[in-house]
Image (cartoon, rainbow, N blue to C red):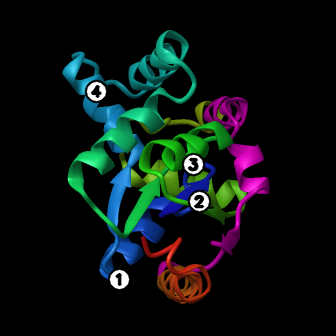
Amino acid sequence: MLLVTGMPGSGKSVFASVAASLGFEVFSMGDVVREFAQRAGITEAAEVNVFADRERKDHGPDVWAIRTAERIAESGARRVVVDGVRSRFEAEVFERVLGKRAVVVAIVAPRMERYRRILGRGRVDDPESIMELQSRDWREISWGVAELIALADYYIVNDEDLDSFMEKSKKKLREILEREAPAGAE
């Protein structure tokens, strides 16, 4: 089981799509958050983030990991990538709930490059200004993403064009499969 972490806009979803092309089933924590928010009638970016924070306060800091892990367990998926893990507490949930060793992959990218990507991608919960982006970074750091990045098993630097990053991702995934089997493959 691979857990993908990184700051917003670092390339986590691109890495996950490359993993999917290699046969992994991808589960996005952000998609789970957006789905629950939509069920609650929330669609505005700032409101989705407030909703995610409120759920963490009401149900614990690992609520989104628990909800995502439950989906994975229900699916019966064996080769799993979880996109968007934000803390070591969330990482521990996946290991505990699914009973598998987690391999953490951190995607890192320069701050201004991340901001440029986010401003261009148009997700419903994406900030629309540099100030909002900085605020989002600090919020995610407060959740524990920096600590998880520091503790990652593998790193990929995403500071080139998309094709180069996809190739780096494919190479790193093959390396992980060779080194970590069965942990990374199961």
Quadrant showing the C terminus: bottom left
Residue type highlighted by circle 2: Ser
Q: Residue at x 47, y 52 (%)?
A: 99
Quadrant for residue 80, please give it. bottom left
Foreground: disc 2 or disc 1? 1
Q: Which residue is mark 3?
A: 8
Residue at the far front: name it: 99
Q: Which residue is mark 4?
A: 36
Tell me the magenta residue range: 134-162
In the rendered structure, the answer to whether residue 74 lies left or right of residue 29 reads left
**Which is nearer the N-term, disc 1 or disc 4?**
1
Task: Give the alpha-carbon distance from disc 1 to disc 4, as whole Å.
Answer: 29 Å
Q: Which residue is mark 2?
A: 10
Q: Which residue is mark 1?
A: 22
Task: Give the alpha-carbon distance from disc 2 to disc 4, as whole Å.
Answer: 24 Å
**Place of residue 61 in the rendered image (x, y in percent of width and height, measured from the top left):** 57, 25
Foreground: disc 4 or disc 3? 4
**Which is nearer the N-term, disc 2 or disc 1?**
2
Q: Residues within 10 Å of mark 2 (few under 14, many from 20)?
A: many
